[in-house]
Image (spheres, grey):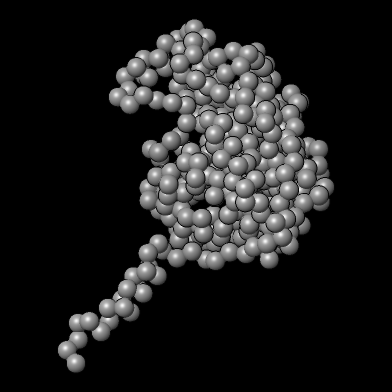
Amino acid sequence: MIGDRQVIVFHDERMLGHRPDVENPFLPGRLDKRVREILAGLVVKWNYPEHPGRITAVTDLLGQNPVPGVRMEPGVSATAEQLRRVHTSSYVEDIYALRAQHAWLDVDTTAVSPGSVEAAEVAAGTAIAAVEAVIQGRADSAFAVVRPPGHHAEPVRARGFCLFNNVAVAAAHAQAALGCRKVLIVDWDVHHGNGTQDIFWADPDVLFFDIHRAAPFYPGSGHLHEVGAGLGEGTTVNVPLPGGAGDVAMVKAFREILVPAADWFRPDLILVSAGFDAHRLDLALNVSYQGFATMTGLLMELADRHSEGRLALVLEGGYHTESLSHGIRTVLEVLAGGGWQEPEECGVREVMDAAAFHRNAFRDE
Ligand SMILES: [Zn+2]
């Protein structure tokens, strides 16, 4: 029943201070010039899609329509030491130097505004707070509703709206400070988590499972044969899907690839890079709320089996505010003990009903 399990949602107003605006003058340089040229060549005016309204849509919905068993807590800021576990010192210093400035960091649309560095520190720190809450047993599961997102951020590079790799910072903290040895990271965002893959590429203690829309869809990585290297060969698992794939494909991949991999790996903690841009309203894949609910339920079963139930989700993408907010609310209902119903191929039930309805229409009695 909803309310049987305790869930903490972490969010923090400081993450709303990240407001890149393409109309502002940015730090001068070659990259700024190149981005200006690209923007000037677009037929339709481009706005930064990763905006504060994404988060306020979620908190507004949860305020109007709370989920029993779910309580809200503020986030915390990550320290330089915590960030340096997955990013180089010089990269962290370079980002810190951008406080109070407007700058482009990449042609992949990663920009900062005066509040962005603090927002990124809070996003990473809040992912850590979610992990601490489940490891300390203060909640059965936790959801860090953060921005900027993180899974495209590499050790030395900001990409795809991401500055610091929030889920990787949280995984590294669990290992370095909270006594977890093995961490499973499941990335169901529609885009491949290239940064997370890069960070743990040769690490046998982090199993990274990523299901995403296949290249050449952004960022272009995540091919089937990318399985890690060195001691970590085999602990990176990519499942690329064609555009339009939906619930049935997602759930099949979870049952037939993720579940056996996790049963083999036996994680001490499960983290999720939870993007909601695989929802059909975001137009890249065809996942429904029921699909997200089932993926959540399967992860809860894995966490109960291997990780003392310890499950923490960290928000990644999701740019349609309706599917983002309702997707998160759906996941929270399952986390709170509401159960889920296995999804079917969209429309099949309706066709069966219609077939029964028309069955006698074309018979000569
Ligand atoms: Zn995404």
Towards the viewer: 233 or 216: 216
Farthest left residue?
A: 364
The image shows residue 306, relative to residue 185, as above or below, that is below
**Residue at (69%, 45%) from the top-left corner?**
9
Any part of residue 172 in sight: no
The image shows residue 266, relative to residue 61, as above or below, that is below
Towards the viewer: 214 or 189: 189
Tell me where residue 262 sits by quadrant.
Answer: bottom right
Farthest top residue?
A: 28
Residue 65 spot, x, y in % from top left: 62, 51
Residue 123 spot, x, y in % from top left: 66, 32
The image shows residue 304, relative to residue 322, as above or below, that is below
Towards the viewer: 328 or 255: 328
Residue 208 spot, x, y in % from top left: 60, 45
For the C terminus, the quadrant is bottom left
Residue 100 spot, x, y in % from top left: 63, 13
Tell me where residue 60 sits by quadrant.
Answer: top right
**Residue at (46%, 49%) from the top-left corner?**
279
